[in-house]
Image (cartoon, rainbow, N blue to C red):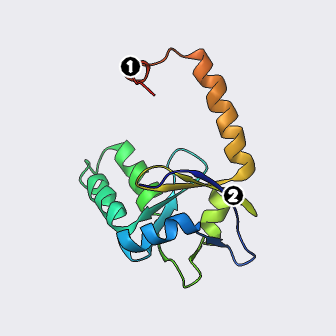
Amino acid sequence: MFRGVHNLTVDAKGRLKVPTRHQVQIDEICAGQMVLSIHPDDPCLLLYPLKDWQALEEKVSALPSLNIHTKRLKRKLIGHATDCDLDKAARILIPGALREYANIGKKIILSGQGHNFELWDEKIWNEQLDNLDELSKKEQIPIEISQLSL
């Protein structure tokens, strides 16, 4: 499971160094083979171990192909997917088109989401968190969340 929020820097070639605490985990789970794609709804990128990506891709591919929501999801999520491997220095290359989609600059956030990571431009990440806080104040807490014990 990938957990935690990491403040990182993208180098001049568009590479991201994976935090040490996740390097061994990624190597064990997928031998460094990852898939990077755009998030279909948020201005960020998604980074999956290959095996978890393949499971997600199978689920998406099994959806009704004539459904407009399926088409949108396939074109965004699967259509932008890029295979990437951790290099010997534990870096991944973020292709320019994906960096552009998510407005990724030099400072980024790598946020563990369990089976995958989200990659955000640091400024947009902070704006999104503030926005979520404001929106959540306007809506009633769903019963499933209110019943959680932390």
Closer-to-camera residue (52/148): 148
Q: CA distance from mark 1 to mark 2?
A: 33 Å
Query: What amino acid is labelled 1 in the image?
Result: Gln
Quadrant housing residue 77: bottom left
Closer-to-camera residue (90/137): 90
Instruction: Give residue 23's position: percent from left, percent from top.
Output: 50, 70
Residue at 44% x, 76% y is: 32
Closer-to-camera residue (123/58): 123
Residue at 31% x, 44% y is: 67
In this rendering, would 118 be left or right of 107? left
Residue designated by label 1: 147
In this rendering, would 108 be left or right of 88? right
Instruction: Give residue 136's position: percent from left, percent from top.
Output: 58, 23
Q: Which mark is residue 108?
A: 2
Instruction: Using the image, determine if residue 88 lies above or below residue 79.
Output: below
Mark 2 or mark 1, which is nearer the start of the sequence? 2
Query: What amino acid is labelled 2 in the image?
Result: Ile
Q: Which mark is residue 14?
A: none
Instruction: Using the image, determine if residue 132 lies above or below residue 122.
Output: above
Crowding at mark 2 (Cα within 10 Å: few <14, some 14-19, many 20+): many
In this rendering, would 110 be left or right of 50? right
Crowding at mark 1 (Cα within 10 Å: few <14, some 14-19, many 20+): few
Residue at 46% x, 55% y is: 2
Residue at 33% x, 56% y is: 56
Instruction: Give residue 44's position: percent from left, percent from top.
Output: 59, 52
